[in-house]
Structures are given as structure tokens and as C-alpha cells.
Image: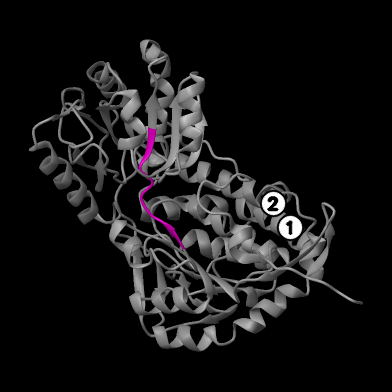
Amino acid sequence: MTTIPHLPALRLGRNYESLDKVEVKDHRTGEVKALVSQVNGGIVKRDMAKLGQARAALKKFTVNQLIDLSAKAGDLFLNGTLPFGDQGHTQSTQQYIETLSGTSGLPHIMVKRNMAKIHYALTHLSEVLNGLSRGLDMGIIDRGFGEQFGTKLSFFPTCQALGLVMPSNSPAVNSLWLPAIALKTPVVIKPGKEEPWTPYRLIQAFIAAGVPAEAFGFYPTDHDGAATILNSCGRALIFGDKNTMAQYANNPAIQLHGPGWSKFVIGDDCIENWRDYLDVIAGAISDNGGRSCINASAVVVPKYAAEIADALAQKLGPVAPTRPDDENARLSGFANVKMADFIDAQIEEGLKTPGATDATAKYRNGPRKVVFEGGTYMRPTIVLCDSFAHPLANKEFLCPYASVVTCPQNEMLQKIGYTLACSAITKAPAFIEQLEAFPEIDRLNIGPVSTMKISWDQPHEGNMFEFLWKRRSIERAW
């Protein structure tokens, strides 16, 4: 009889089995994929007092050595068979894909694409850190001081460790913390409830590559434990909704990763050719199952909004759930069915306000929320809005959703608000200059470039080097 794998907590590298365990189940079949030990805030707090030991374990290495070990970890993560829990189980790449797909709802092809992103980040850390640090000689981090660019330089760490409160929506979000190890910073992770697999597999890959186990904390825990991680490490990342972000908005030690409200805007000079841009816009809305903060959630145009909404609806409306191993799968299931219920209800409630139409309804040939082979899915939704005043005009959901909004070009920047990734289809120098100067856009693409396109050396959300290391003035007499 096959035993159910048990994932222990990792108390700075040491396996810990708790009496309190949760079952992580397949979202379609209900099959238990693993038991995961849960720890309370008291255990987390005790371990946070030992972070100095974790940092000392990494200090023995140079940054370049850790870059090399990270590349090995990347190859092991992508291709290796790694320890899976504390009972002798192992996990191959295919087993990881199937397990993650089963509990998160992501089809296999999307898991593979997310794996490729993580692998790329780990195997290209030299370029990533070069971009993040603006070309700093990493030997200066090893020594603490040095000279470069004709000036004296010194850096010191801002924290004992990087705390992470992770989500369950997309495995590639783990790529955000990967530079921390090369930057000699331990990581303390609270995994997402339905997605402990990716951080656990990454930790095992790092350990197998030769990074000290003490550098890793893996703490499945409750809100109290999560708060302890956020407040004890010195620097932390948290992922969540707008309400979660509001709680930490004034804490510079906590980097927030919430809704992105990413957008396409089309300028007056390019709008007549809108048909040429449909494929890139549709892809930006639906890639990765619509689960990313850089998925486009609004398309802002000076005219032809009805025609564009209808054309996008024709492309996306017929998209339906398929089996998870279908190489052409485009939708993700919901491990938390209540989330699908909530999203569907929010859209329906918004449509009751005059000024919006579900353009996909007539191409969907059925309900938006559907059950397929035991899994719950949200089919794509394109909503035509007559202005940004409509409640559905600037919404974001964990599924392929976007509004198409009419707005004069000279009012666009006043209306769009915060935008994580903005793809602006325009060649007009004056409009481009305005976009470049607009402070509410974190990442700007000029031309028909997907909002989903990222450059690891140009972060779209925070600079991990500047977050973990701070420059100080220095003078040395000897």
C-alpha cells in the first residue's frame, strides 16, 4: 500500500513533524496528495531568533559561488528527482507537474512554462544581478567595501533573512525570491495552502546543489505565524488582495505584491490598425490562465471599443476547459471553489450597473462558471465599459478577464491609475514622453508587446538587490 507523502516544516533546514497536519487534495478528484505539517506562531518566533546562524551559513560563500550553485539548483529543479518529504519519498519532474496541476488547477502545459521561467531565472543570475545592481562588482558585497566606477563603495545587509508569504495562484512568483540566496540572504517561506510544492522543490534543489540547509525555512502556518515571519525577518514579501496590501502599505520593510491592474492602451495614431494587435492583446489577457498580476485586465482605447471587445470576445469566448494534460489547455481550475463563486458573482453584480456589456456571453454558449470532470473553471470574460466610472472598468480577477474602455487619449493617464505593466501601442513621441513620465506605471512597454513579457534584469515589481542591500558612505585609513 502506497503511503501518503508527508511534507514536514523545515525549521531552518531541520525537518519538523507537527501533530497538526492538513491534507492537500486534488481539486478535481479530492485525492489526498500529501499531508503538510503545520506550525504555530510560537515555533516560528523561536526560530526567528536563530536567523543569525542561517545568515552565517551563507556568508561562507562568495556571491559568485552562490550564483554557480543557484544554476545547479535550477537544473535540478527542472530535471531532477528530489526528496519529497521526510519518509523516503522522491519526486520526479513529471510527478511534480502532475501534483501541482492536481492541487492548483493549472494544466500541465502552464506548469511547464512556469518551470521554464524559474529555471531561466536561476541559470541567468549573473545577468539578473548585473541589471539589479547596475553593474556592481559582486566582490564588493563579499568584502563589504571596494572601489568601482571611480568611487568608494560599501554595502551592508538590510535584514537577517527574507520573509515570504506566498500565494497559490502561480508557481512562477517564486522566481522573485531566487536572487536572495546568491545575495547571501536566507529565506523564510510560508507556502500557499494549495501550492507548497514549488517552494519545497526549490529548497530541495538548492540543498542538493550544495547550499546549506540552514539557509531555508519552510513554515506552513496560520495568520499569526505569517505575521511573525513578516515582522521578524527585517525584509519580507507578501502576496494578496487589495485589503491585504492595505494592512502593510506604510511598512517599507515589506514589499507588496497585490493586484497589478495591468493594461493595454492604444494611441490615436495606431487605433485605426487595431485589428493588427488583437493576437498580442488576447494573449496578454489569457496567458497563464489569467492568473498573473501582469495579465492585461483592461484595454483602453480612444474609439472602436465595441468592435475591439467583440473581436476579443470571438477569440476568447469559445475557450473552454480541457483535460489537464492537454497541450493546448488554456484555462486553470480553481482549487478553492468559493473563489470562482465569488468572481462570478462580482462580475454579475457589476453588469447590473448600466454602461457595461459581457461581450463574451454570446460566444461562450453557456455559463461563465462551469464544472468539467470534477473541476471548477471560469471561462474568459470580456466586458465592454462606456467609461472608467463603471465598477467593472478597472477590475482584476484570477481568470481571463478584461474590460475594454473608451477614453480620449488626453485623459488616459488621468484615468488609468496604478498600472503594474502597461503596453502602449503608439508611435507618437509626445504621448510616449507622457507615458515615460507617468509615475503610476511600474513597467512600460512601447508597441505591441505583451504585458506578460518580463526582463529579469529589469524588475517589474521591486529591486531585490536594493531591497536586501543598502549602500553606505565609507572612508578607511587602513
Magenta-tinted stretch? 255-263
Left or right position of 176 against 283 = right
Residue annotated with mark 2: 125
- SS at circle 1: helix
Residue 15 at least partly seen: yes
User: Residue 49 placed where, x, y %?
Assistant: 55, 87
Choose top left, top right, bottom left or bottom right for residue 144: bottom right
User: Residue 3 placed where, x, y %?
Assistant: 44, 70
- The single residue placed furthest to the right in the displayed view is 478
User: Residue 445 placed where, x, y %?
Assistant: 51, 32
Q: In the picture shown, does residue 372 fall above or below 251?
A: above
- SS at circle 2: helix
Q: In the picture shown, does residue 351 fall above or below 151?
A: above
Residue annotated with mark 1: 67
Going from the N terminus, do you reach mark 2 or mark 1 first? 1
> Depth check: 137 or 432 in front?
432
- The amino acid type found where label 1 is placed reads Ile
Task: Sort mark 2 into few (<14), some (14-19) or many (20+) by Cα contacts within 10 Å.
Answer: many
Whether tag 2 and tag 1 are in contact, CB under 8 A, the answer is yes
Choose top left, top right, bottom left or bottom right for residue 239: bottom left
Q: Residue at point 23% right, 35% down?
A: 388
User: Residue 281 placed where, x, y %?
Assistant: 39, 26
Q: In the picture shown, does residue 121 fall above or below 84?
A: above
